[in-house]
Image (cartoon, grey):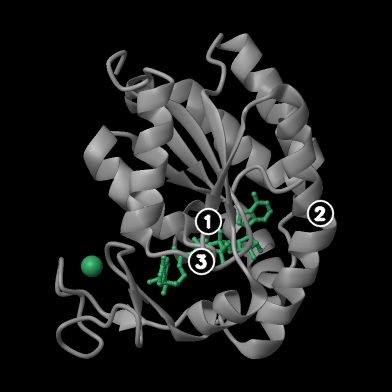
């Protein structure tokens, strides 16, 4: 199955992706994670992306589209199905993704829109913590690691992303409303959009999604 996860920062895209990756054996493709990896490796893309990410702005389309195109056309694992998390984030990215998928004849199955309200988003992003080593997601109150600042899964260091501060969160929300919201309508017109309540517990969201897959007989094809 080929899925896209859409929604504001903090809606729980990464968390749901981690759950689905396990249960459906899908490859998790997060442009945020890919860009942070480029920064870590100090590549040209990483250097260019860093200043945008720090400000909470979008990295220019051509950089992320290039990363995604390379991934979808050269990583053999994507044949087993994948989850795009945090991409596309602009109409241009959505159009280019359609072009790439037409070329490789792999249409998307669903675009999952995780709707979430502002107070929930702010609480989640303010308390979000991430494992530096494996990317596992934690939350100071909602999902603390067993041992402070140590990842339950790999023992790596659990840290707070530099862009999860109040001022940058505000910018990211503005950017979301202006640039990413239109992507929802783009997919609605295509009839691919399914809405999920991102304010709910992640397990509840997963159950609601499995119900959709069952109704559409998607799981027996897998
Ligand atoms: P969140 O989990 O809060 O939604 P991400 O990890 O997906 O954040 O993204 C972090 C930052 O990386 C974004 O604020 C943006 O600067 C950059 N980024 C990630 N994906 C994209 C994209 N598809 N287009 C442009 N910039 C992106
Ligand atoms: P996104 O990828 O959409 O930016 P994340 O999955 O990174 O969102 O979640 C943001 C923060 O909120 C993380 O700290 C995560 O542990 C927490 N979180 C995610 N989903 C839920 C949920 N359904 N209920 C409570 N906390 C959640
Ligand atoms: Zn870890």
Q: Is residue 17 above or below residue 219?
A: below
Cα distance in 3D space between marks 3 and 1: 6 Å
Q: Is residue 170 left or right of residue 11?
A: right
Q: Answer above or below: position of 123 versus 30.
A: below
Residue 48 lies left or right of residue 110; in this view the side is right
Element at badge 2?
helix
Q: Quadrant of the C terminus?
A: top left
Does label 2 or label 3 sit earlier along the sequence?
2
The number of callouts visible is 3
Q: Looking at the image, is mark 2 or mark 1 nearer the viewer?
A: 1
Q: Disc 2 designates what residue?
A: 179
On the question of residue 163 being in view, the answer is: no
For label 1, count other residues whose C-alpha is less than 10 Å away and answer few (under 14), some (14-19) or many (20+). Answer: some
| Labels 3 & 1 near each other (Cβ < 8 A) | yes
Q: Camera-side residue: 64 or 193? A: 193
Distance from mark 3 CB to nearest ligand 2 atom below 8 Å: yes
Q: Are marks 2 and 3 in contact (CB under 8 Å)?
A: no
């Amino acid at each position: 199955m080929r899925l896209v996860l859409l929604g504001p920062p903090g809606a729980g895209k990464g968390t749901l992706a981690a759950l689905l990756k396990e249960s459906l054996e899908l490859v998790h493709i997060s442009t945020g994670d890919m860009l942070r990896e480029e920064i870590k490796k100090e590549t040209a893309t990483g250097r260019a992306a860093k200043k945008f990410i720090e400000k909470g702005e979008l990295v220019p389309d051509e950089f992320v589209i290039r990363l995604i195109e390379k991934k979808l056309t050269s990583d053999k694992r994507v044949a087993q199905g994948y989850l795009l998390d945090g991409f596309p984030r602009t109409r241009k990215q959505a159009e280019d993704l359609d072009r790439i998928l037409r070329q490789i004849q792999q249409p998307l199955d669903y675009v999952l829109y995780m709707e979430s309200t502002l107070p929930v988003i702010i609480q989640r992003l303010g308390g979000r913590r991430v494992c530096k080593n494996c990317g596992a997601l934690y939350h100071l109150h909602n999902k603390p690691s067993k041992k402070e600042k140590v990842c339950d899964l790999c023992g790596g260091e659990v840290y707070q992303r530099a862009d999860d501060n109040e001022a940058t969160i505000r910018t990211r929300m503005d950017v979301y409303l202006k640039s990413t919201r239109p992507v929802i309508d783009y997919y609605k017109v295509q009839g691919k959009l399914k809405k999920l309540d991102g304010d709910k517990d992640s397990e509840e969201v997963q159950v609601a999604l499995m119900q959709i897959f069952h109704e559409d007989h998607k799981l027996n094809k897998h």
